Image: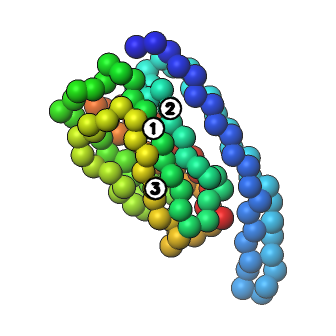
Amino acid sequence: MNPISMCCSISAELCITFGDSTTCCDTVNIGYCCTDGHSLYTTLDATPSPANNEITLDYEFLPEILPTTSPLKIDIVDAYGNHKLNIYNAVPSALQNTIPVNISKFSTGLYFFVLDFEDEVETFPFLKQ
């Protein structure tokens, strides 16, 4: 496979209100780049981020991945690694895919899409406002 470069950075202001009505706000910046040459995807993106009630995951496999009989599993975990939601668990049939995800019941914070395919796991961050 040819090496690809994926870069992502997200920034949002997060505020926490404590029981005594004290509010603490801070800007959170997260960024990373991957050029390891082992990525299965030519496109991996989540929009909008930060998101309120719905976020859309867009991904495109490298052409040599399909056809396959291996399942793709996509989960969402929180910043502590706690499983929050499974959004896909099936054999992919298309190179390009778009999955809208309802996150309206998630608390404000940092989350990750976790894509697990053929023993390769990739994560992609997003913020819930």
Q: Quadrant location of residue 23?
A: bottom right
Frontmost residue, 24 versus 38: 38
| Residue 4 drawn above or below residue 88 | above
Where does label 2 land, which residue? 43
Q: Residue at x 43, y 62 (%)?
A: 84
Q: Are marks 1 and 2 in contact (CB under 8 Å)?
A: yes
Query: Residue 120: x, y in percent?
Result: 36, 31
| Residue 123 appears in the rendering | no
Query: Residue 55: x, y in percent?
Result: 53, 56
User: 77 left or right of 128?
Assistant: left
| Residue 78 drawn above or below residue 5 | below
Tag 1 secondary structure: strand
Tell me how far mark 2 sits from mark 3, CA to CA.
16 Å
Q: Quadrant location of residue 95?
A: top left
Query: Residue 72: x, y in percent?
Result: 30, 41
Q: Amino acid at mark 2?
A: Thr
Question: Which numbered circle lies on residue 100?
Answer: 3
Q: Quadrant of the N terminus?
A: top left
Tell me how far mark 1 sits from mark 2, CA to CA.
5 Å
Q: Amino acid at mark 3?
A: Pro
